Every structure is written in C-alpha cells, then in structure tokens.
Amino acid sequence: MLAIIGGSGLTMLSNLDVSHREVVRTPYGEPSGAVVFGQICGQPAMFLPRHGYGHTIPPHMVNYRANLWALHHHRATGIISVASVGGIRADLQPGEIVIPDQIIDYTSGRKGTFFEGNGSAVTHVDFTEPYDRDLRRLIADAGAALGIAMKSGGVYAATQGPRLETAAEINRLERDGCDLVGMTGMPEAVLARELGLPYAAISVVANHAAGRGSSANGIHFESLDSVLQEAMGRVRAVIEELVGRRSGRLPMEIPS
C-alpha cells in the first residue's frame, strides 16, 4: 500500500476516498496525526499530514521516527513525500514540480535513526542514493502520461527551520550544489531507508529562495497560497495516476 506524507500545501488528500482513520501508538511517541486509510482510483493508500491536520507542528518538532514507524507498521510498500520548497536554481520558478535525486542535510538536533538506545547495535545504512530510483521513475512516468511538466533531478537542501533562510545562506547552499531548499527532507528520508521503505519526494516550488528572483528583497507570503493551491492540484493528479502504476515490492523487516 502506498503512503503519502503531506507537507505545507497538502494537509489533506482530497482525492483519497477515506475508509477510516487510526491513531497509532509507537515506541517513539505520537505521530503527527491519525493515519488516514482509503482508496485512490480503487487502489488502497494511506495518508499522514507531516505538520498535523491543523498545520501546527513546526519542521524541527515533527516526530519523524513515529511517523515512519506508523506507516511501516501498517505495511506501507512505499512512501511519497510531498512538500513545498524554495527554488535556488534559476530555472526553478514558483509552481514548478521537482523530483529531487539527492539531498544535503543541514539540520541539527533531530532524532535521525532507529538504531540507538536499548543496546541496539550500531547500524550503517547505504545512503548513496537517498531517493528510490524506481519510485522516482514512476512519479516521472505518471506526470508524463498526464502531460504535467516535472523536473527530474535536483539537490534538496534540508534546513532546520522554522525561519526561512538568509540570502547569504542561500548563496552558500548554491555553492554547495543545492538546487532547492526545504525543512523536512531529513531525517525523513534516511528513516525510510532504515526501515527498507522505498521513498521519493515531490517538491513544489512555492517561491524563489531568499535573494533570488521575486524574493530578491524578501519573501512575499501573500502569493504563496495561490501558487501552492494550483500546483498541489497537479500533484494530486500525478498521485492518482501513479497509484495504478505502483509495483508491489515489499520492504525489509523493521528493526526492533
């Protein structure tokens, strides 16, 4: 069953025909909200809002471990993360949809592994390709089938938040090779890897990053909602198309 984690701009999945909701208790505390189960185009799927249903949980306080554990517990076979980002690269305009293939982690203090405490053995997971190649391809194929333009590839910079970045920080991220910037990509991606869950991201460019384009002198928040609302409509359509294409690849065992 495919799981969708919704971020800013996607706190509800309107095309999910809901069957029930379930509050999941995890060894890592409370997830961001109840897991919503249902069907998309007749295929089972589940949804979890990363920031809570009222969008009240800031990026640095999201319980990423509980969220991923809850979805794995309910036998997710893959995860699509949807989130808004700022565009650093010049061609990434507001409203663009990107399927990133790499990530650089600039966060701090977040619980980033399941393998700690209670005598758990030190475990290293390969993270050369942080996003699942097959799931990324399915997303791209779904967009192409619908004629929805999506940019495949890009380096996601995961920053701490909740404040936005300074122009100087964006300059640094660009020098580091980053193309887009968000606040929730890590440790979500690596936790999915630890659980053996195929994970890919759909990043919606909500605005130019600080010091770039229309944000040269500051971020104009009043324009973000309309950009996200329109772009998330395209994202929902892609998810509908993708659900029917998803393979039944099973994840590995969860660490105890």
Image: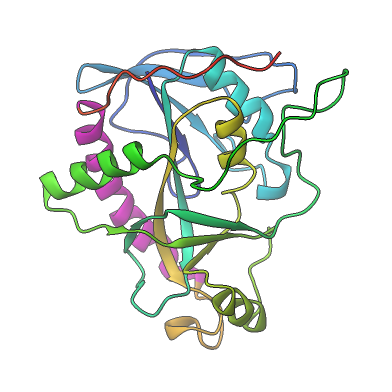
x then y, percent, for residue 5:
48, 35
- Between 24 and 197, which is closer to the camera in this rendering? 197
Residue pictured at 42% horizontal, 27% vertical = 78
Q: Quadrant of the N terminus?
A: top left
Judge whether 12 appears above or below 167 on screen.
Answer: above
Residue 73 is drawn in which quadrant? top right
Residue pictured at 67% horizontal, 48% vertical = 58
Magenta residues?
A: 221-244
Examine the residues drawn in magenta and state their main secondary structure.
helix
Q: Is residue 118 magenta?
A: no
x then y, percent, for residue 93:
34, 73
Residue 241 is drawn in which quadrant? top left
Q: Is residue 12 left or right of residue 63?
A: left
Judge whether 21 appears above or below 124 on screen.
Answer: above
Q: Residue furthest bottom?
A: 217
Q: Is residue 129 left or right of residue 142?
A: right
Q: Quadrant of the C terminus?
A: top right
Q: How is the image coloured?
A: rainbow
x then y, percent, for residue 118:
87, 18
Residue pictured at 68% horizontal, 64% vertical = 163
x then y, percent, for residue 161:
68, 59
Q: Is residue 123 left or right of residue 1?
A: right
